[in-house]
Image: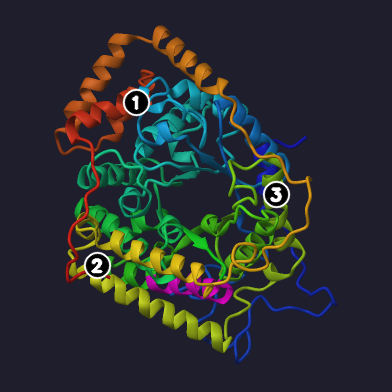
């Protein structure tokens, strides 16, 4: 039987027929004048409005990676293996709230949250169990982690070393977009500027030592789910991406060295054609910025490569099966928009973490979309549509207008410190909610077509085992009892000293991880230097968007 990594690779590279279901031949892409006429808007050519590759998905599908993680490391490891066996082509790891916030499982602040929203990770031992039996040499792993991204990357890299995989050969992504945490999500630890430094340290480290690793996934997803419009999702994410890149340029790196490994995650919502246009506009907008602002010479540095998650906020707790339909349309919009990776929000996630059954349905939805609908046979099939081309221009123009306002506020970090982005999202979310309450925006099952067939055959809701927290604390105690306490103290002291200076913090973090220092201990060493952030709200300023 093939290893999970072999299955993932083969399923992501199908041979799709070059004819439709009726036997009619299909070109790789279409233009108004024909496929062989010189046209700057061809797929695979700068500025990539029509897609990153001229063949589209014909010889390589998007990566299918359902978001997974819960309980302890063993439970998450089992779910990973089940998803790979079902045909998933990459891993996407969810971490529990204490791990995201730099708290160990035995912290009083972690009580009741251990293993609930994702897998509980305290030390290197947990990561070793989480990825046991999974070949890191051939599997791409995405980690949705931000404030503690540097620590989790260090742990994953050390696990790779112990599997015989050099850090330079690891493939995957750390989300690591701490700026959007201050804008829309809230899982930050330190104030914005030291948080920003730590994120860029990881990007710099990976640019020099992990060339196959996406050290950041700049996120528009959470901005949209928090209530932002499509244009705000585009503009705020791009502004954050520009801030990270500007800092790397200041540190002496060239765009061609780091920009190819800036990845992205965006939302796909219910406005079908608007979402298709958004992805097309984003590629053009980013390509132009990277070339003009940073002087990138290589086309690959100008490519916006994005993962897409269907809209979690669009899921409804009533008639949850209808969420399957919503996710299917949102996924089709993403595919028609030419994205590189996708995960569907499962239909029962409006109630709890997804069940294994719901994750399989979400994965099968992607597989039907890829293999049965025909959308993967032609690159940018909606290109040339008067409506889609109009929306593409309008979405880009509105996003650029917002981006100009952020520049006037002093850039992304300054705009966040002033509350500019946060207020704009709050106002958009309020307008949306009022439209729903007044019936101006229709949501099936919520404010229209609310009648439903009475049935007891609803899917079971996922329930986290309350024993997970007790067991995780016992594992942490065992690791602490068996490690070299002096080595841990020395490593943490060295990390604190480094944080007071200007050097990159990844090397001392990796040393602390190797000594089996915990996520909480490493985070505390940085808290002592950086402090902890408390959100504030400033008065409205002229730079608001």
Q: Which residue is mark 3?
A: 10
C-alpha gap between disc 3 and disc 1: 39 Å
In the image, which is nearer the foreground, mark 3 or mark 1?
1
Residue 452 at least partly seen: yes
Q: Quick check: marks 2 and 3 in contact, CB under 8 Å?
A: no
Depth check: give the residue in front, 76 or 167. Answer: 76
- Residue 5 is inside the magenta segment: no
- Disc 3 residue crowd, few under 14, some 14–19, many 20+, Cα 10 Å: few
Depth check: give the residue in front, 103 or 499. Answer: 103
* Lower position in the chain sequence, tag 3 or tag 1: 3
Depth check: give the residue in front, 473 or 153. Answer: 473
Position of 207 with respect to 271 (left or right) is left
Circle on res. 520:
1
**In which image quadrant can residue 26 be found?**
bottom right
> Which residue is rendered at x = 61% and y = 71% of the image?
336
Circle on res. 27:
none
| Residue 82, above or below 369 | above
Magenta segment boundaries in residue numbering: 271-285
- Disc 1 residue crowd, few under 14, some 14–19, many 20+, Cα 10 Å: many
Q: Which residue is mark 2?
A: 406
Position of 134 with respect to 281 (left or right) is right
* Lower position in the chain sequence, tag 2 or tag 1: 2
Q: What SS does tag 2 mark? A: helix
Q: What SS does tag 1 mark? A: helix
Q: What SS does tag 3 mark? A: helix
Q: How is the image coloured?
A: rainbow
C-alpha gap between disc 2 and disc 3: 44 Å
| Residue 299, above or below 478 | below
């Amino acid at each position: 039987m093939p290893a999970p990594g072999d299955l993932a690779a083969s399923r992501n590279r199908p041979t799709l027929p070059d004819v439709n279901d009726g036997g009619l031949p299909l070109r790789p892409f279409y233009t108004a004048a024909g496929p062989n006429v010189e046209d700057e808007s061809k797929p695979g050519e700068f500025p990539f409005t029509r897609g990153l590759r001229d063949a589209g998905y014909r010889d390589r599908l998007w990566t299918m990676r359902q978001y997974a993680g819960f309980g302890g490391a063993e439970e998450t490891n089992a779910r990973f293996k089940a998803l790979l066996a079902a045909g998933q082509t990459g891993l996407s790891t969810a971490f529990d709230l204490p791990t995201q916030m730099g708290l160990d499982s035995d912290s009083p602040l972690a009580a009741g949250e251990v293993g609930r929203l994702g897998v509980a990770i305290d030390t290197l031992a947990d990561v070793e169990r989480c990825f046991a039996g999974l070949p890191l040499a051939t599997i791409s792993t995405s980690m949705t982690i931000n404030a503690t991204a540097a620590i989790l990357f260090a742990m994953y890299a050390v696990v790779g070393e112990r599997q015989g995989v050099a850090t330079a050969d690891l493939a995957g992504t750390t989300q690591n977009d701490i700026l959007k945490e201050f804008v829309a999500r809230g899982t930050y630890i330190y104030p914005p500027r030291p948080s920003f430094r730590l994120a860029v340290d990881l990007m710099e480290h990976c640019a020099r030592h992990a060339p196959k690793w996406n050290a950041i996934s700049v996120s528009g997803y959470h901005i949209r789910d928090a209530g932002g419009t499509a244009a705000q999702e585009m503009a705020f994410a791009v502004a954050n991406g520009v801030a990270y890149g500007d800092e790397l340029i200041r540190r002496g790196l060239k765009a061609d060295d780091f920009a190819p490994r800036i990845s992205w995650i965006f939302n796909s919502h219910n406005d079908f054609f608007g979402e298709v246009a958004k992805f097309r506009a984003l590629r053009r907008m980013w390509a132009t910025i990277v070339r003009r602002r940073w002087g990138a010479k290589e086309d690959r540095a100008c490519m916006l490569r994005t993962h897409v998650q269907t809209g979690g906020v669009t899921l409804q707790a009533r008639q949850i099966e209808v969420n399957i339909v919503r996710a299917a349309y949102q996924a089709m919009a993403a595919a028609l928009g030419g994205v590189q990776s996708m995960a569907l929000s499962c239909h029962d996630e409006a109630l709890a973490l997804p069940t294994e059954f719901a994750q399989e349905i979400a994965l099968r939805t992607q597989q039907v979309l890829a293999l049965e609908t025909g959308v993967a046979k032609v690159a940018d099939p909606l290109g040339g549509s008067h409506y889609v081309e109009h929306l593409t221009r309008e979405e880009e123009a509105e996003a650029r207008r917002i981006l100009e306002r952020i520049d006037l506020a002093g850039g992304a970090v300054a705009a966040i410190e002033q509350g500019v982005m946060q207020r704009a999202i709050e106002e958009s979310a309020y307008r949306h909610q009022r439209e729903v309450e007044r019936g101006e925006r229709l949501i099936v099952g919520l404010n229209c077509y609310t009648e439903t067939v009475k049935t007891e055959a609803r899917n079971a809701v996922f329930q986290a085992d309350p024993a997970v927290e007790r067991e995780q604390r016992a594992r942490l105690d065992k690791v602490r009892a068996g490690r070299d306490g002096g080595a841990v103290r020395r490593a943490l002291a060295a990390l604190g000293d480094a944080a007071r200076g200007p050097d990159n913090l990844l090397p001392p973090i990796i040393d602390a991880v190797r000594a089996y220092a915990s996520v909480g201990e490493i985070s505390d060493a940085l808290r002592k230097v950086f402090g902890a952030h408390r959100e504030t709200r400033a008065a409205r300023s002229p730079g608001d968007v």
